[in-house]
Image (cartoon, rainbow, N blue to C red):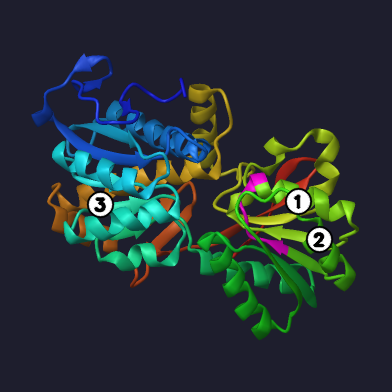
Amino acid sequence: MNKIKSAIMIGAAVLFTACVGGEKVSETETIKIGGLAPLTGSLAIYGVTTTNGANLAIDEINKNGGILGKKVEYITLDTKGDSTEAVMAYNKLIDRGVSAIIGEITSKPSLAVAEIAAQDNMPMITPTGTQVDITEAGPSIFRVCFTNPYQGKVLAVLAKERLNADTAAIMINNSSDYSDGIAKAFIEQADILGIKITAKEGYADGDKDFRAQLTKIAAEQPDVLLVPEYYEQASLIATQAREVGVKAVFIGSDGWDGITKTLDSSSYNAIENSYFTNHFSMQDTAPKIQNFLKSYKDTYNEDPSAFSALGYDAVYMVKKAVENAGSTNKEAVVDALKNIEYDGITGYLTFDEHNNPVKAVTILKITNGEYIFDSKIK
């Protein structure tokens, strides 16, 4: 948490005088952007890394003249990953006079805030909320990441065209819209591509023992096992799957980013040659990506996650939209976002009619505990 910059306000709204580069700045000289993220609690790892990426972008922008000649004040409030807290934080940001909102991070609080932001016609970009109905809240709501159904379809294409799979099994978190949305889209696309679903097993949030479900899957001997889950539980499922004899190739969603952090290196063999969707690859040699990687590591003394890159891109998308609009007028910024063409760390994108990004999905392969670029699928 000590890596979060002083502009972040954790918890309840703590009033402070804006500072940019160590100097006091009057409110009339700034453009205010609000941030919503879980900075404490079980989801803090996602909120912190996303906010770090956003802050890196803010620092770069201010060092290069700001937006429309004004410095940017980035005000982030802690939502704890809770929908009620997120709505309260949103209202506090509105009281502070923000011109746009970046957040929320996970899907449920993102949807809760989106429903209110849409009524206010407030430009809102969730960097990482993948639930499909978030942007359906209204025309002022956008996202940087791809949706759950989008990556579910891509994973089916990966299974068929890259891994030559004829059969697949699925482990679904029945408590998670994220897991369920990816699984449903995968099943639909698998049927189109001729992949037979031989087993579909469920579990609940917080479960630790998956051996009973995985033993049933092992008996079916599927070519691939889809685990649409965040990395904490995905690592447990993967290691237990190997224990009970599952030989399938694991394929996972973007929630797998960080899975090696939960495993000792002696357990890397459990996820060896697994594949998962992601938003960018650190092996990409494009100068802008390598510059981002270096700046992030120099600032935070660690490598960025995909969440960091999405937060970074969200800030630059707001910058481009405000500059294209020529003002912070809400209607003008929303119109500018709708028509944006943005080439960022997580790829080149435009928005479809539902304000969801149209862009390629990066596929990473896990080899010796490293995430190796495999391919891109659109």
Question: Which residue is farthest top?
Answer: 22
Amino acid type for the residue under numbered disc 2: Ala
Choose top left, top right, bottom left or bottom right for residue 333: bottom left
Residue 98, x across and y down, in percent = 19, 41
Using the image, determine if residue 271 lies above or below residue 261.
below
- Identify which residue is drawn at 16% across, 36% down: 96
Amino acid type for the residue under numbered disc 3: Ala
Residue 137, x across and y down, in percent = 29, 65
- Of tags 1 and 3, the one toward the viewer is 1
Mark 2 vs mark 1, CA separation in Å: 8 Å
Q: From where the camera sits, is residue 100 visible?
A: yes
Q: Residues within 10 Å of mark 1 (few under 14, many from 20)?
A: few
Do the residues under discs 2 and 1 have CB atoms within 8 angstroms? yes
Left or right: 368, with 157 as reference point: right
Q: Which mark is residue 321?
A: 3
Does dot 3 land on a helix, a strand or a loop?
Answer: helix
The residue that mark 2 highlights is 212
Tell me which numbered mark, 1 or 3, is placed earlier along the sequence. 1
Mark 2 vs mark 3, CA separation in Å: 51 Å
Q: Which residues are the magenta region? A: 226-232
The residue that mark 1 highlights is 209
- Identify which residue is drawn at 67% across, 48% down: 233
Does dot 1 land on a helix, a strand or a loop?
Answer: loop
- Of tags 2 and 3, the one toward the viewer is 2
Left or right: 137, with 169 as reference point: left
Question: Which residue is farthest left?
Answer: 28
Q: Residues within 10 Å of mark 2 (few under 14, many from 20)?
A: few
